Image (tube, rainbow, N blue to C red):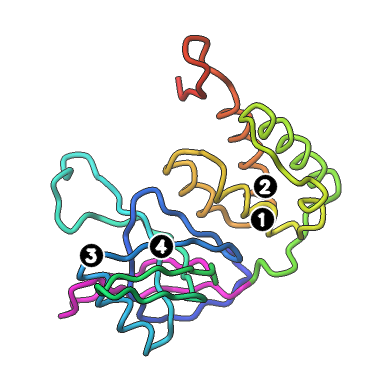
């Protein structure tokens, strides 16, 4: 966590979902269908509308562990849009509020998991990159988007503040789950921007056989 960012300790309901990494200031749509997570949504809607998005972690030798271990860092999301379906399912949109670090998992009677977490203040608001860092990020993003065949409104991108741009690329780019977790765990926007550039260069390389980015 950023050293200068004040922390608060809170109990939060968590949604461990592989590959779903939420970043502060970004939105994440979710379709909730499992009974335990329906119960979670019903509870948080009357509590604080907040859900901790965090990835489960498979540890060597514990592949069948239930419930699975968790990564140490996630992101608290606030429900900003909800559609309750007739059969009890929900469609949600979460807005990333702040990163959190798990202090301990709580012993609860709810069907969903809850943790005691250190929640970082919204310290990324107003975070700025040096002009050369911003230029490097945009340049690499354009190269990456062209290689991936993405159509991007670069005029709109140019209007984004630095934190939104960095976090937006981190969340939507087709990096693997481990890479996105590493991005979430970076201590500052400057470090995250540097890692985003490195990942775009890495994942932008194409395998000669099938034209796909490769980890080899």
- The residue at the point 64 percent across, 49 percent down is 191
Give the class, few, some or many, for how many residues have Cα within 10 Å of label 1's Cα (few <14, many ≥20): many
Q: CA distance from mark 4 to mark 3?
A: 12 Å
Classify residue 3 by image quadrant: bottom right
Q: Residue 123, how many percent across, how many down?
A: 64, 71
Q: Residue tagged by mark 2?
A: 193
Vertical arrangement, residue 185 with respect to residue 92, above or below: above
Q: Are marks 2 and 1 in contact (CB under 8 Å)?
A: yes
Give the residues drawn in magenta, as a range.
98-122
20 or 92, nearer to the observer: 92
Q: Position of residue 110 (x, y in %)?
A: 19, 79
Q: Which element type, helix, strand or loop, lies under badge 4?
A: strand
Q: Residue at x 58, y 57 (%)?
A: 187
Question: Do the residues bearing badges 2 and 3 touch, measured as CB atoms within 8 Å?
Answer: no
Task: Give me the residue at 77% from left, 59% from top.
Answer: 128
Spatial distance from mark 2 to mark 4, Cα to Cα? 26 Å
Q: Is residue 105 magenta?
A: yes
Judging by the rendered image, the residue that carries numbered circle 1 is: 189
Q: Is residue 128 magenta?
A: no
**What SS does tag 1 mark?**
helix
């Amino acid at each position: 966590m950023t050293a200068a960012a004040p922390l608060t300790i809170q109990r939060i309901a968590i949604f461990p979902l592989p590959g779903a990494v939420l970043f502060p200031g970004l939105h994440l749509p979710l379709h909730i269908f499992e009974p335990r997570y329906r119960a979670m949504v019903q509870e948080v809607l009357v509590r604080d509308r907040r859900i901790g998005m965090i990835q489960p972690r498979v540890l060597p030798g514990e592949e069948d562990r239930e419930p699975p271990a968790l990564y140490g860092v996630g992101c608290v999301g606030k429900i900003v849009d909800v559609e309750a379906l007739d059969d009890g399912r929900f469609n949600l949109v979460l807005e990333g509020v702040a990163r959190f670090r798990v202090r301990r998992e709580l012993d609860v009677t709810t069907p969903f998991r809850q943790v005691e977490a250190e929640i970082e203040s919204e310290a990324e608001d107003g975070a700025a990159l040096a002009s050369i860092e911003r230029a490097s990020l945009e340049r690499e993003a354009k190269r990456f988007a062209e290689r991936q065949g993405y159509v991007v409104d670069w005029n709109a991108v140019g209007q984004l503040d630095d934190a939104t741009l960095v976090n937006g690329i981190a969340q939507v780019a087709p990096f693997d789950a481990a890479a996105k977790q590493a991005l979430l765990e970076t201590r500052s926007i400057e470090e995250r921007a540097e890692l985003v550039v490195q990942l775009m260069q890495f994942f932008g390389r194409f395998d000669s056989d099938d034209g796909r980015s490769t980890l080899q």
